[in-house]
Amino acid sequence: MKKFFILFLLFLLVLVCATPSYARGIKFNYRLKWLFNTSVAGDIYADAKGFFRDVGLDVTVKEGSPEKNAINELELGYAAFGVASADQVIRALDKGAKIFVIAQLFQVNPMQWIYRTDQPEIKTLQDLKGRNIGITFGGNDETIMNTLFAKAGITKKDVTITGVRFDFTPFFMRKVDVWPVYRNSQGVILKDKLAREGEGVYFFNPADFGVNFVANSVVTSEAMMKNNPDLVEKFLNALLKGWEDAMDPAKEAETLEAIKKLDKGTNDAIRKNQLSVTRSLIKPSVSIKIGTIDIAAWKQTEEMMLKEKQIKKSVNIETRLIQIK
């Protein structure tokens, strides 16, 4: 019996040693901000290529939605990491959330405005005067546009503001001149549709006029940062490796293939164009390291939200930004 017991222990030892590291890895969820599509190419690529498993992590990458808020899930313990826009982060901090930003994915906010080329090009903010501008009331675009108006000294009497939703009909019928879009998703689709009808478009990018409102970033809880710093570093390194590869033009075919498996509702040509635009927003120059946190842009975002009374007090956002090397 003793000999059998020793042999059994040896068998278990061999079994454990033979088990791949990822099977014994730490298991947790990573909650995205929105659905699987080209705008989360790096997240999809890191998962598909096994980068998390390679560092001993068993990560389930989950789609986001209005009902699946990453910050809420961090606080409830349903996810260890997540993706949130700057306004979500700052609002949560204003309400007492204990979270940190550990990487900024978009260096340029994809929230922009589209308008036709048969209209005068918006070269200065004064060129906004007289336009019918679409705004999602209560959305990021309202805060951004109000900041642009204030910067240019434009009043609501100088423009026509129209509330918009997901129905693009008013834009197609020219009832609204300048329409808010996510440049790398809706912007690509609308540009393609209008091109097939013989119409060209311009995009109005607030960053070109000094207004930088931070978009999607990677967040985690204060407890995770304090208790598991090594895990945070492993996860982030694997994730950013996925983003670097996904944004590499030489790996475009592999990236598109991985996205297509999860985003079956978009045609190949649109998906390819969306990836190209996403690349310009994530890595606008080769010198920028993906994940770099733009502290000045975060502070500007907080200032805008404070001025718009979206938060009650300053949250000192710079104290919640951690650039992991």
Image: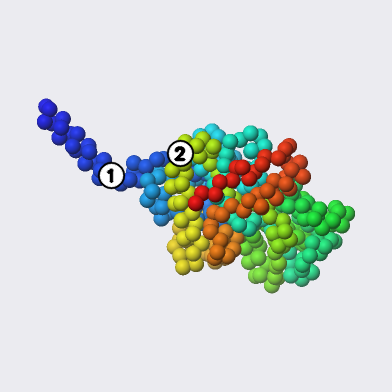
Amino acid carrying label 1: it is Thr
Query: What is the number of the mark on residue 278?
Result: none
10 Å crowding of disc 2: few (<14), some (14-19), many (20+): few
Residue in the picture at 73% in, 41% down: 310
Mark 1 or mark 2: which is in front?
2
> What kind of element bears circle 2?
loop
Residue that sits furthest to the right in the current view:
157
Q: Which quadrant, please, contains the N terminus?
A: top left
* Real-space Cα separation, disc 1 to disc 2, in angstroms: 24 Å
Residue in the picture at 26% in, 40% down: 16
Q: Position of residue 128 (x, y in %)?
A: 81, 61
Is residue 319 shown left or right of residue 116? left
Instruction: Write down the quadrant of residue 74 in the picture.
Output: top right
Which residue is denoted by mark 1 in the rendering?
19
Q: Pick whichever of labels 1 and 2 is earlier in the sequence.
A: 1
Q: Position of residue 179 (x, y in %)?
A: 73, 58
